Image: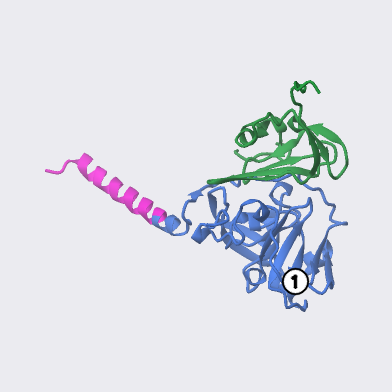
Chain colours: A green, B blue
Amino acid sequence: MSERTEFAFYDGNSLAGPLSEVFAVELTTAVGRCRSCGKSSEVATFRVYGPEPGFVGHCPHCEDVLLRLVRTPDALWLDFSGVSALRISMPADSTGS
Amino acid sequence: MEGPADVLEVVVMSIVSRGFRGRRRDSNQRLPPGQYLTDDFPVLSAGPTPRISLDDWEFTVVTELGQSHRWSWKELTGLSAESVTADIHCVTRWSKLDTAWRGVSIDTLLADVETAADFALIHSYGGYSTNLPLEDLLDGKAWVAYEYNGQELAPEHGGPARLLVPHLYFWKSAKWVRGIELMPQDFPGFWEQLGYHDYGDPWREQRYQGD
């Protein structure tokens, strides 16, 4: 059977490909805070449903929707509104300040 | 000179080609552009399957003036039901012919609802939503379906009840449906907010915004 069971979600690493199409930094290791429950989790730990009709990343704590991503033939649509803040690791500031 | 093998070949060819062409012509006419036929029933979900006990389940219609009409599971399934056989078309390009459903027509649910709304926003348990013009829910075009193939509708296919609007792409047939919000203006639903077409007519291949 080609039917997927209800438990068949992926982890957030499945977002690496589509996110790398538009972001210069690796976002799966970024940490997002859930707007709904306030808990933080690495993007790689989001519970991701999809890829069709689109990716939907759910909070691993409260299951609310954190992000949605749809790739149409000529655009990428991204909704990060379920994430109140995203912490992205950057190289240490080398400007000496 | 015709040998037995030649005769046999001619007979087989004619049976095969007649039957094959007949079925293909019929199926092709029922297949919108860009779609392929499947005998499976693929499961596409945007989130975990909601589990709602039938004791807690309810279906709510809210009008543009804020008036609510509610049906418990017992009340919904006590309404006159219809059997519906329909072809369904998913925006991810699969189509399935002659699917068999049973449920309550939206005409029945809205019979005593006073509204001047032109649009409907469908809400589901689990947070999903989808929008469509109210007229696409009326006149025998849409149902709240709770049986598939003579069985109660399985949770992965939207049970206990889903919307069935077979003339539009199947994302409009919201799984785990819990109500209809009637609105004077259109408001985009879950996928319509994110690049999918506002209306979604499979025969005009309205998959994405701008199609």
For residue B149, say whether it is visible.
Answer: no
A80 sits to left or right of B171? right
Residue B173 lies, in percent from the top left, at 66, 58
The front one of A84 and B22 is A84
Residue A6 lies, in percent from the top left, at 72, 41
Residue B100, placed above or below residue A41? below
The front one of A1 and A77 is A77
Mark 1 neighbour class, 10 Å CA radius: few under 14, some 14 to 19, many 20 or more: some
Q: Quadrant of the N terminus of chain B?
A: top left
Is residue B137 on the magenta stretch? Answer: no
Is residue B3 on the magenta stretch? Answer: yes
Mark 1, residue position: B109
Q: Of helix, strand and loop, which mostly describes the magenta segment?
A: helix
A76 sits to left or right of B189? left
B208 sits to left or right of A58? left
Residue B63 figure quarter = bottom right
Element at badge 1? Answer: helix
Residue A20 lies, in percent from the top left, at 63, 33
Q: Residue at x 43, y 55 (%)?
A: B28
Residue B176 lies, in percent from the top left, at 75, 54
| Residues in magenta, as a range | B1-24
Residue B174 figure quarter = bottom right
Q: Which residue is drawn at 78% across and 50% down?
A: B126
Q: Residue at x 62, y 60 (%)?
A: B198
Subunit that carries the residue with mark 1: B
Q: Label 1 sits on what residue type?
A: Leu
For residue B1, say whether it is visible.
Answer: yes
